[in-house]
Amino acid sequence: MSKILSNTELANIADEFGTPLYVYDADKIKEQYNKLTTAFKNTDTVFFYACKALTNINILQYIKSLGANVDCSSINEVKLALHAGFSPERILYTSNGIAFSEIEEAKDLGVIINIDSLSNLEKFGKKYGHSYPVGIRLRPNIMAGGHLKISTGHAKSKFGIPVDQADKIISLVEKYNIHINDLHIHTGSEIEDVDVFVKGIEVLFDIIPKFKELEVIDLGGGFKVPYKKGDTETDINLLAQKVNELFASHPNPGGKHLQVWFEPGKFLVSECGYFITKVNVIKESGDTTFAGVDSGFNHLIRPMFYDAYHRIENISNPNGEEKIYSVVGNICETDTFAWDRKLNEVREGDYLVFYNAGAYGFQMSSNYNSRLKPAEVLVENGKAKLIRQRDVFEDLLKNQVI
Ligand code: LLP
């Protein structure tokens, strides 16, 4: 939970750009990326940034400059990645539940594709045969992740082709001579226990021998980062060690070398992000004091949607007496960011900062209640640069047929 931007820096940025405001610290992204590449330096491992976490073009370009590739979850993310300058061979499209036309589009753009259903695999085989290497997303039937809503590999999950249907996959691969070069799994988000990845690899080891042209196993994303004081993050060094040991003890049948891919989202961009709000109203009510900020779950949905904990600090009064507050938004329904949270005395006009706001913060924001989406700022080389304008009223009318 390292904190890189100081209270003064954050307050100055908020004074300059207004609130509510998302602020991202490029150095923190670099620090996280370096942790990954350092831990896996003696292995053939490639990292694809799961850009659904935060797709601002400036962030994509910064992450590209670090040397990472990019993982996309829609054709539009693929197009954003191309727009940011990633070459197609550095773009992975891990699809789920999509129309075949989107796979055709991705193929025409020349990006790497993971297919997640038997029906799309069959359509792919019929149309392209052996001509275009493709990956398969498998569902390993492993329960993992920090919340049921972000668990994706368990036996009731919609994601991937259930691994117990391997025979069906093989018969399609043989029938159409499909070139399978990658097997993919992603079991969930906020996985602290590295043995989850070990289990996933073991599941894959059982079926790897059936795919003669395999070059890659893709273990998805899901590394945990600390949100609360005292939280730990996934031990990336231990993970690298275990992955190495597993590969050393299971030489690939056929003697072929396999590259390992990961798709980290939160690990790269969660902690780089600060969401700065301003307190509009203090309301006393029985034994509760509400601190009402100039935002709501339309801007940061994680607490209401996943019961997520985001650390909050009153950067305007860091030495004020500690009191208990419920931090709430201004949306016209219950939108509590934090229940009974100890904060330094909060006064109207103070800046409250939410930490870990880089991943799935702005990206999941909306215009609910016809509120405007916040601006975004990137701090790089000590300079704060506006990377997204705050919405203006006209944005609410855009696309409406009047
Ligand atoms: N790869 C695939 C195929 C994924 O579905 C995801 C996330 C990732 C990689 C990146 O996972 P990460 O490293 O960020 O945990 N909105 C939720 C998280 C949803 C994650 C969806 N898939 C949240 O705010 O907690």
Image (spheres, rainbow, N blue to C red):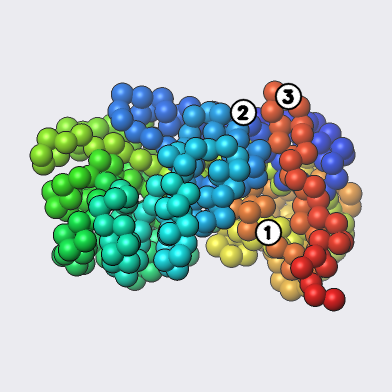
Residue 134 screen position, x and y as percent: 32, 51
Identify which residue is drawn at 31% across, 38% down. Answer: 260
Task: Find the residue positioned furthest to the bottom.
Answer: 402
- Between the residue at mark 2 and the residue at mark 3, the CA separation in whole angstroms equals 9 Å
Most foreground residue, 382 or 52: 52
Give the vertical position of 12 relative to 322 (above or below): above
Identify which residue is drawn at 54% across, 33% down. Answer: 64
Residue hosting label 3: 382
* SS for dot 1: loop
Amino acid type of disc 3?
A: Gly
Residue 363 screen position, x and y as percent: 63, 54
Amino acid type of disc 2?
A: Asp
Residue hosting label 2: 27
Q: Which disc is residue 365 wearing?
A: 1
Whether ligand 1 has any atom under 8 Å from the Cβ at mark 3 is answered as no
**Quadrant in the picture for the C terminus:** bottom right
Q: Is residue 372 visible?
A: yes
Mark 2 or 3, nearer chain start: 2
Q: In this rendering, would 125 be left or right of 231?
A: left
Q: Image quadrant of residue 162?
A: bottom left
Identify which residue is drawn at 75% across, 45% down. Answer: 388
